[in-house]
Amino acid sequence: MEENRDSLKNERSGISQIELYSTNYAGRLPAAEIKISSHQLNCEIFGKPDPAISRTSLLALHAVREAVMDAGLTKEELASPETALVGATTVGGMCLTDELFHDALAKKVGTPYLSSYDYASVTLAIQKQYGIKGEISTINTACSSSANAIVYGARLIRNGFAKRAIVGGAESLAKFTINGFNALNILSSKHCMPFDRDRNGLNLGEGAAFLVLEKEEDQLHKKKYACLSGFGNQNDAYHPSSNSADGEGPFLSMQQALLQSGLQASEIGYINAHGTGTENNDETESVAMKRLFERVPSFASTKSFTGHTLGAAGAMEAVYSVLNLYHQEIYPSLSFLNPIVTTGLIPVSHFSKMELGHVMSNSFGFGGNCSTLIFSKP
Amino acid sequence: MTFLHQSICISPQNTYPEADFSQWKASNNNLLEVIEPAYPGIPAGTRRRMGKSVRMAVGAALPLLENVKQPDGIVIGTANGGMEDCIKFLNQIIEFNEGLLTPGNFVQSTSNASAAQIALITKNHKYNITHVHRGLAFENAMMDIVMLLKENAHSGYLLGCVDEISAYNFNIDRLAGWYREETVQNKDLFIGSFNGSIVGEGAYMVLVNNDMENADAKLAAVKTLHSVHVDEVSESLSKFISENIKEEESIDLLITGENGDIRLTPYYEQIESLFPESIPVARYKHLCGEYFTSSSFACWLSTEIFKNKQFPPDILKKGKVIKPIRRILIYNNFRGLQHAFILLEDVNPH
């Protein structure tokens, strides 16, 4: 987490050429690849590497370990029936694209990864590692998956089905998503330019982020980063893979989050926008922001640092939002030059300190799945 | 409180449009494939683009949404979503060596495609989510709605689940040992001692709100657990029962997810032993096959029993049905790790 913050403060993007993952697009389509091999991650987490685990699960385990340590959860607390776990991913173990293809057709002997392809395998790896006994779910609402995982965990606590919840998402680069997004013509061959007039697509990324949610009264003496004060989940109901021109889903989702938080639009100090850098998203998100806010607050897309990490994006950006509040600072959008002609919005382009009470974070996905989180200073 | 209203179940048996228990369909090469209706509600062009799971889910959802108030949310459980589309896209990647590909299969394969299509066709802008937690995807969707109804008193939701058989996925799970190597007829699923089961598929959709009037059943409680230990599962179920059933009362029927895999027998035996001999035990996976969201088939059977006051043939494992069935406990065990308890009650016990 500190490494992330350091890069955000110093405006250092993680987007580069693909070096570790084997794909024809290595060297052609930039992506935010974590430059640590799966083997090394595996050794760091397990000592003796687990032969049946996917990179997505390894990234998730790495993030959960840091979150759990930071929150000071004991082994007993983790294994308690009152600890919930909600994961999110859109690719799961399908980063093992070649192995999956082999196993789909093999007659007699499969690879060791037979139980590691599905979405749930990522959450189940965490469940196994910590012996978690409470409510557990995995959510896939495309690119808003982990925002919804955070909300589901919060609701489990609020409704008395858990005392604490470990929530987040993980994603790793995969031929499946690289080729999928490329077939849709929305991958940029350059560094993505969120909210820029000349943006021409997104860069994929990989990563994982997990947060520990607890009730305020249960963590009186702990470090509190932020409070989740509102959330929205609404559907654009327009097209399977693009947003409506008036940004109805994004608008409704932000509006619902505001309503739920009891805040006025003017109280939002900063928005971590979805801002993928595609033609469609950035324009419709801008339209929606302008519909909701009389004066659009400072906003930026940290996807210019992380690439679009799909199922992990909501949780990674939730962590950044929480850091915004904790350190009273805002992170910029990189590579921005000119505003979109029709909307004219200009994102924050440099790191700065800023007094913040409330931060909004947007995540919009295929299938019209729009989600918004609002975090507040505790 | 959570009440289940009209439901539609598209399954390997004759469950839709009319339930017909007079003859059960036989499995074919360890597969129980759904009997797909004509889907008159889905425009032909849209239908052709849909993969099987999306088609089944949308096909089961649309008739329920005609002539009712727009639901306040669409909550779907599916472990894999469009597996067939997923592998078709994978085939493209390999066949064309990551060349120029068409995105249709990719977009259809995302597991939120069913919930998204239902929202798109019915222009529903409200809460929309897809739970994908393998053998508990359906129960988690249920749990989501239990909470939604606590949060918003006067609301109503579409709850559903879907999972499809794909030849490739079947192969992966077969290699992992979850399906029988030798061919077995579904009627003989519980004979002998074997590893593995037969595979099934299906879609289930139900309208849920907190209005008891005209409800088919009350969802009294749902709980899930991850554990490989038989004792832990049975302790958890005992706790579930003491929390949700008054001491002087009991369940009238236990429906288990027994699937003919001998490795799961200890769990089912232990759970059955928690109840007196007088409580009949039923099972259902010889009818719908084993799949990730198959406990929805047991939910559908339960509401049929409540509604029609008749007991489907060939599902009773032991005991006798003597008194009216007013309270049903469903216990499902997915691959020895994921456990679910669902408690349903009849709301019109006359």
Image (cartoon, rainbow, N blue to C red):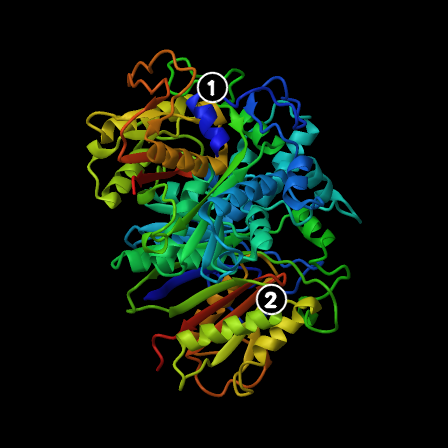
Vertical relation: B240 (above or below) A209: below
| Outermost residue toward the right in this view | A108
- The x and y percentages for residue B44 are 47, 41
Give the label on residue B212, or none.
none
Distance Cα–Cα, label 1 vs label 2: 50 Å
Task: Please tell me whether residue B278 is drawn above or below residue A316 in the rendered image.
Answer: below
| Residue B14 can be seen, yes or no | no
- The residue singled out by tag 1 in the image is A192
Rendered view: A232 above or below A153: above
Check the picture and name the quadrant holding the C terminus of chain A.
top left
Q: What residue type is labelled 1?
A: Cys
Q: Nearer the viewer, residue A252 or A127?
A: A127
Q: What element carries label 2?
A: helix
Local crowd at mark 1 within 10 Å, few (<14), some, or many (≥20)?
many
Element type where label 1 sits in the image: loop
Marked residue chain, label 2: B
Mark 2 is surrounded, within 10 Å at the Cα level, by few (under 14), some (14 to 19) or many (20 or more) other residues, namely many
- On the rendered structure, is B232 left or right of A287? right
Residue on which the image places disc 2: B285
**Residue at 58 percent of width and 81 percent of height:** B273
Question: Is residue A256 shown left or right of residue A237?
Answer: left
Q: Mark 1 lies on which chain?
A: A
